[in-house]
């Protein structure tokens, strides 16, 4: 696997990683709710208040967003490259009132036809891609399978923590760590993928590295 597709890192494939992420990684209510708050706010802002037909959660990990996202769709589909993550997510999906499906697949190569989903959510994935081409390919794939909205998180290069790193006031994560990119780069990738950025959302603008972007896929020619 290319370095730019590092979602298949052993960090997410090892035994017990699913239970760790489900029970420990986001165990505080504040940590667990931060991403959901941004996704929920964007959906409300963009008028997606009623359940859509199909929603894709990729990568779905241990299913921490599944309950909230499934409540906004008649059909919820989660995708992850990690079997341990999918095993940890299975009990949560079984509790959902809506039909739910979890599929093992790689986010840069989704096994769905064009425009299969009304909403695609990609949380905490793009900042693991080190190569510029990998970022473009991933965003292109998210837009390809959507016929409506794509909501994705990334690390904002204009945030205070990243500014402190550039000045040497905060330790960098190293060559295999998470990668921050500028908003202009994210917007350019969506434009190349046939989608228009229509909103941004962060817990605290300029302070939070984790930032969400919402894009609407342009109508495709038939």
Image (cartoon, rainbow, N blue to C red):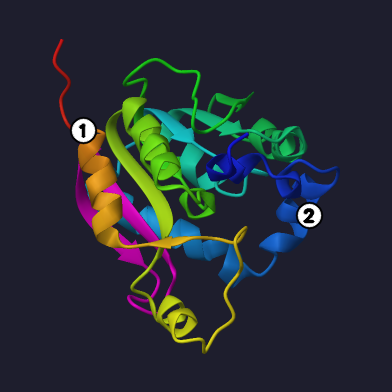
Image x and y of residue 172, in percent: 57, 74
| Residue nearest the viewer, comparing 186 with 96 | 186
**Where, quadrant-wise, is the N terminus in this rendering?**
top right
Q: Place residue 202 in its image quadrant.
A: bottom left
Whether 25 is drawn above or below 186: the answer is below
Residue 158 visible within the image: yes
Identify the image quadrant of residue 162: bottom left
| Main SS class of the magenta portion in the image | strand
Instruction: List the residue tagged with mark 1.
Output: 194
Decide if residue 10 is on the left or right side of residue 145: right
Query: Circle 1: is it few (<14), some (14-19), or many (20+) Cα within 10 Å?
Result: some
What residue range appears in magenta?
195-217
Q: Is residue 208 magenta?
A: yes
Look at 50% across and 30% down and name the residue there. Answer: 76
Residue nearest the viewer, comparing 113 with 175:
175
Q: Nearer the viewer, residue 175 or 178?
A: 175
- Which residue extends farthest top? 222
| Residue, disc 2 | 20
Residue 64 in percent (x, y) is at: 61, 49
Horizontal and vertical percent position of residue 57: 50, 37
Spot occupied by residue 157 in the image (x, y as percentages of width and height): 37, 68
**Residue depicted at 44% across the width and 70% down the height:** 209
Residue sitting farthest toward the right: 15
Left or right? Give the position of 6 relative to 147.
right
Mark 2 Cα within 10 Å, few/some/many (few <14, many 20+)? Answer: some
């Amino acid at each position: 696997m290319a370095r730019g597709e590092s979602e298949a890192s052993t960090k997410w494939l090892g035994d017990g990683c699913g239970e760790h992420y489900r029970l420990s990684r986001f165990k505080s209510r504040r940590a667990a709710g931060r991403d959901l708050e941004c996704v929920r706010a964007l959906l409300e802002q963009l008028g997606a208040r009623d359940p859509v037909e199909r929603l894709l959660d990729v990568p779905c990990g241990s299913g921490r967003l599944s309950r909230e996202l499934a409540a906004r769709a008649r059909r919820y589909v989660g995708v992850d490259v990690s079997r341990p993550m999918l095993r940890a997510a299975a009990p949560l999906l079984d509790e959902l009132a809506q039909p739910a499906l979890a599929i093992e697949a790689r986010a840069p190569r989704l096994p769905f036809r064009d425009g299969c989903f009304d909403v695609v959510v990609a949380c905490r994935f793009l900042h693991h891609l080190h190569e510029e081409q990998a970022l473009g390919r991933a965003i292109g794939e998210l837009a390809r399978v959507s016929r409506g909205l794509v909501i994705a998180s990334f690390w904002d290069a204009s945030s205070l923590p990243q500014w402190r790193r550039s000045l040497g006031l905060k330790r960098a994560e190293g060559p295999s760590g998470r990668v921050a990119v500028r908003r202009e780069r994210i917007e350019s990738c969506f434009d190349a993928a046939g989608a228009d950025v229509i909103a941004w959302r962060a817990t605290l603008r300029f302070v939070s590295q984790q930032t969400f972007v919402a894009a609407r896929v342009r109508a495709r020619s038939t």
